[in-house]
């Protein structure tokens, strides 16, 4: 993920370039990916229900996510020594997702979301410290197609992240400064027709355009997010969420600093998740905590995600 860091001033030292840049990447990627599965860009943004087909109707979604890291890993997974490094990124997003049901258990979904984020980076090197706040890049899902069966779901989607957030070509910002196109395919398997015990996953391929105002293009990424859970009480599911991410093409552009060329990011994560469904409130709440493992060329930390979605009541004729 360090490729996005090349918007930092080129005269920074190698440690400062990596520290500041890696954090900007984590922050910029915290755009959105939540409860009703509004995208899969953010690591840890989807869990047990990543591939589950949502019900028909209009859902209003709120999400709060917190990322914390005190450690940066280099291209071979080694610790990059930066004294006093402390990264904190917190995001909140509000979105809407509309799903309509066609015949033969086929569903179409359209989604839109706007994120607000805050980033703090502290270290013993004052020039490598950042304090940012503002709106990040808008998320749009023009189309998701899903199929629902009593024992399995299948879904595919196209998502786009619009560079609406503030971005300065050589200083970064809360926005990524480029368009991201994401193509996803996945589904879920259920233990029985109650659909309480489940295993789901969503695989995504994302490609990025050239950054605005600077000759940098981040490499393509593959992500898999999902998990497994079982019902332990009425409306309550507990389980394990996980993710995996690999960069599959090189970062390109004449403006990438030499110290960041050849960086290929990678990360895995795993942790517990709890899902509560409250039918009387038409509300679904998710809480997950995932710790990163096997990290290369990016910070290694922990993600805490809280998602709440409200399915508006439908009028029956």
Image (cartoon, rainbow, N blue to C red):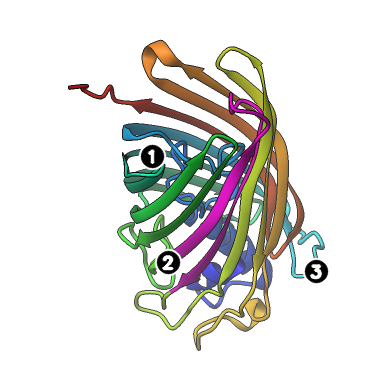
Residues under labels 2 and 3: Cα distance? 28 Å
Q: Which residues are magenta?
A: 182-208
Q: Quadrant of residue 272?
A: top right
**Pair 2/1: label in front:** 2
Disc 2 element: strand
The C terminus lies in which quarter of the figure? top left
Q: Earlier in the sequence, mark 2 or mark 1?
A: 1
> Which residue is at a point 60% across and 67% down the rendered structure image?
2
Residues under labels 3 and 1: Cα distance? 34 Å
Indicate the position of residue 23 as horizontal and vertical percent values. 57, 56
Q: Earlier in the sequence, mark 2 or mark 3?
A: 3
For the residue pair 50 and 155, the one nearer the viewer reads as 155
Location of mark 3 (residue):
76
Residue 72 seen in render: yes
For this view, does 142 lie left or right of residue 293? left
Location of mark 1 (residue):
93
Indicate the position of residue 89 as horizontal and vertical percent values. 53, 44
For the residue pair 107 and 118, the one nearer the viewer reads as 107
**Pair 3/1: label in front:** 1
Q: Earlier in the sequence, mark 3 or mark 1?
A: 3
Indicate the position of residue 243 as horizontal and vertical percent values. 66, 49
Vertical order, 194 against 224 (above or below): above
For the residue pair 181 and 122, the one nearer the viewer reads as 181
Residues under labels 2 and 1: Cα distance? 20 Å
Is residue 3 highlighted in magenta? no
> Which residue is at a point 54% across and 68% down the rendered structure image?
5
Location of mark 2 (residue):
181
Residue 33 seen in render: no
For the residue pair 100 and 259, the one nearer the viewer reads as 100
Is residue 204 highlighted in magenta? yes
Q: Quadrant of residue 68?
A: top right
């Amino acid at each position: 993920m360090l490729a996005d860091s090349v918007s930092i001033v080129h005269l920074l030292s190698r440690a400062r370039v990596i520290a500041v840049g890696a954090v900007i990447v984590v922050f910029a990627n915290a755009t959105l990916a939540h409860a009703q599965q509004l995208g899969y860009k953010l690591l840890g943004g989807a869990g047990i229900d990543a591939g589950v087909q949502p019900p028909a109707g209009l859902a209003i979604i709120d999400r709060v996510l917190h990322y914390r890291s005190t450690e940066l890993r280099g291209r071979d997974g080694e610790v990059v020594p930066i004294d006093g490094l402390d990264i904190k990124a917190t995001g909140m997003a509000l979105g809407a997702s509309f799903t309509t049901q066609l015949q033969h258990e086929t569903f179409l979904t359209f989604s839109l979301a706007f994120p607000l984020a805050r980033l703090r980076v502290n270290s013993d090197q004052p020039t490598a410290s950042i304090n940012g706040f503002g709106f990040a890049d808008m998320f749009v899902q023009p189309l998701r197609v899903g199929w629902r069966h009593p024992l399995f779901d299948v879904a595919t989607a196209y998502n786009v992240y619009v560079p609406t957030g503030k971005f300065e070509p050589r200083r970064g910002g809360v926005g990524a400064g480029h368009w991201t196109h994401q193509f996803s395919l996945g589904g879920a398997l259920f233990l029985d027709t109650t659909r309480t015990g489940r295993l789901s996953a969503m695989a995504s391929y994302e490609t990025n355009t050239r950054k605005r105002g600077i000759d940098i293009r981040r490499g393509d990424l593959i992500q898999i997010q999902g998990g497994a859970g079982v019902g332990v009480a009425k409306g309550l599911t507990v389980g394990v969420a996980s993710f995996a991410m690999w960069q599959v093409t090189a970062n390109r552009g004449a403006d990438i600093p030499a110290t960041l060329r050849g960086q290929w990011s990678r990360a895995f994560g795993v942790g517990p998740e709890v899902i509560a469904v409250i039918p009387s409130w038409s509300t679904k709440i998710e809480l997950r905590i995932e710790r990163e493992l096997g990290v290369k060329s990016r910070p290694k930390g922990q993600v805490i995600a809280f998602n709440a979605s409200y399915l508006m009541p439908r009028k029956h004729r």
